[in-house]
């Protein structure tokens, strides 16, 4: 029998993350108001910390044809790579506000975003730390999107050297 396990961190309040990541999480929370989520009323904000110290934000953008919408994580990463293609990505903070009220349950990235972040980590040649929080309460810090995507499919599976 084989077992998959990973460790993650929990913090009680944003200030416990240290100055830079605290600021990053605050930005993710702030930009939730920019989200376009008329169908779910679940407004997600994501903020990316780059190795040059800059922060880039993204939000979810929904569409009347539901699958066309984009999550905040992919929106933020698309923006970061478009603006700073050669700059490393250190971390991404994600939070939300919801019409269903306050919650200390973080919004973990959806399956599609896990796959997307995983490939951004490959491109980045480094893990991207995920800082996840609900509308209030504890903050979960995960070392890499790959921790949330065991046995991830990736470029290595397509780009076999001997084929
Ligand atoms: N959503 C995100 O933007 N990120 C997540 O991590 C979870 C879900 C969005 C997609 C959709 O616009 C809304 O939240 C409800 O699923």
Image: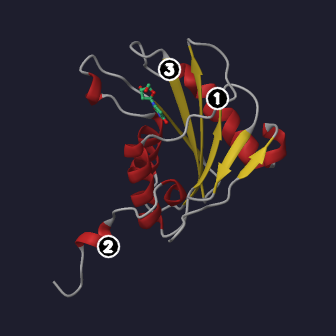
Label of residue 29 in the image: 1
Q: Residues within 10 Å of mark 3 (few under 14, many from 20)?
A: some
Q: Which mark is first along the chain, 2 or 1?
A: 1
- The image position of residue 96, as x and y in percent, is 58, 27
Which type of secondary structure does the marked residue at label 2 adopt?
helix
Q: Residue furthest left?
A: 163
Residue at point 67%, 25% (across, down): 135
Labelled pair 1, 3 in contact (Cβ < 8 Å): no
- The image position of residue 20, as x and y in percent, is 74, 48
Q: Does ligand 1 reach within 8 Å of label 3's beta carbon?
A: yes
Residue pointed to by mark 3:
42
Residue pointed to by mark 2:
156
Residue at point 56%, 34% (across, down): 107
Where is 68 relative to 118, above or below?
Answer: above
Which type of secondary structure does the marked residue at label 1 adopt?
helix
Where is 61 relative to 18, above or below?
Answer: above
Q: CA distance from mark 3 to mark 2?
A: 35 Å
Q: Residues within 10 Å of mark 1 (few under 14, many from 20)?
A: many
Where is 37 relative to 125, above or below?
Answer: above
Q: Determine the quadrant in which ligand 1 lies.
A: top left
Q: Quick one: quadrant of the C terminus?
A: bottom left
Quick check: 59 left or right of 139? left
Residue at point 67%, 41% (across, down): 24
Residue at point 45%, 53% (across, down): 117
Q: CA distance from mark 1 to mark 3?
A: 13 Å
């Amino acid at each position: 029998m084989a077992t998959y396990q990973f460790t993650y961190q929990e913090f009680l309040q944003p200030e416990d993350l240290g100055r830079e990541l605290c600021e990053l999480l605050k930005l993710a929370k702030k930009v939730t108001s920019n989200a376009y989520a008329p169908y779910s009323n679940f407004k997600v904000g994501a903020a990316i910390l780059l190795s040059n110290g800059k922060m880039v934000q993204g939000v979810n953008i929904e569409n009347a044809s539901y699958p066309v919408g984009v999550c905040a994580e992919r929106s933020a990463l698309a923006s970061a790579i478009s603006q700073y293609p050669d700059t490393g990505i250190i971390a991404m903070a994600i939070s939300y506000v919801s019409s269903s009220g306050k919650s200390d349950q973080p919004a973990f990235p959806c399956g599609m975003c896990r796959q997307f972040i995983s490939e951004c980590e490959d491109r980045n040649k480094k893990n991207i730390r995920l800082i996840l929080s609900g509308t209030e309460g504890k903050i979960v810090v995960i070392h890499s999107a790959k921790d949330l995507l065991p046995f991830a499919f990736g470029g290595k599976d397509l780009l076999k050297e001997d084929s």
